[in-house]
Amino acid sequence: MKKGWKILLISCGICAGIGVVLSVAGTVLGGVRDLQEYGRRGMQYLENDHWWSQKYSEPEEMDEELDYIDEEVSPEITEDLEGISELDIELSYVELIMERSDSNQIEVSTRNMDPQLLEDLSIYRDEDTLEIRAQDTRLWKNIGKNSAGELIIHVPDNLEGISTSLGTGTLYMCDIRTGELDISIGTGTADIQGFEAGEVSASAGTGSISLQGSVNSDLDLECGIGTIEFQDSGKMTDYNYSVSCGMGSIQIGDDEFTKPAGNQNINNHAGKEMDIECGMGTVNIAFAKGE
């Protein structure tokens, strides 16, 4: 073959290779932009190798299988949700208000919330669990660090479990009845009054938690360098205790536990268990009926 033809064929091959590379790159980048766009607009989930968005119309045949809530939030809106047995909340910078409902429905509403945060707020079902999330945590930090507004939830008595994780912000909970109650606070504060639960778990990082109510089974408290206070409706001898204390202090009724005491187990031959771990913070337990 003549030298000129060889050069021509080599040049054509190089051009073809570049074309393939550019085509693949364009497809990948386009797909990434599509996912980014979906990420800005709502919850995403993968079904049959396709990404669907919560705020986009779904095929009718998928409605019963996925059971997602089409949430078009506005400054004052209430969603009545039936068939929910558990509630799972993970937010930050917001004022979260949870109150007892007079009905068998969960009612969710907002007040004085920035429109961008409303658009980012995701409320959706995962089987029998209602989940409430912030999609873009950086957005909530930038906008909500001064005031993210209020999220109000009215909760019926028949829920099997409630889990609330609040990085920073404020949690108010009043007269809640549930099987399991799980509260996690980072740098925020929680005020939980008049509750009744089978099992209770509460953890505070640098924030503070104040609880008043009744535990029917087990209580698990974990405190980093923050503060946990609990006013139990019963007596001190209603519980057996497992106590672990670092540099902080634990007060149970009239008994105080500090670092020299280390780990202690107290067996009152009771039907309920209380497990307390404290790092450098403070845990105070008081009893309405004394010892």
Image (tube, rainbow, N blue to C red):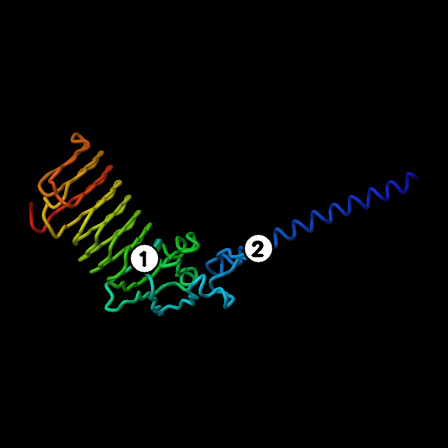
1 or 2: mark nearer the eye: 1
Q: Which residue is label 2 attached to?
A: 33
Image position, residue 183 (x, y; %): 27, 50
**Residue 43 marker:** none
- The amino acid beneath tag 2 is Arg
The one of 148 and 86 positioned closer to us in this rendering:
86
Total of numbered circles in the picture? 2
Image position, residue 238 (x, y; %): 11, 46
In the image, what residue occupies the spot 20% across and 46% down? 218
Corner quadrant of residue 1: top right
Query: Is 227 on the left or on the right of 74, as rendered?
Result: left
- The amino acid beneath tag 1 is Glu
Q: Secondary structure at mark 1?
A: strand
In the image, what residue occupies the spot 16% across and 45% down? 272
Characterize the local packing of mark 2: few (<14), some (14-19) or many (20 or more) Cα atoms within 10 angstroms: few
**Residue 86 marker:** 1
Corner quadrant of residue 261: top left
Corner quadrant of residue 108: bottom left
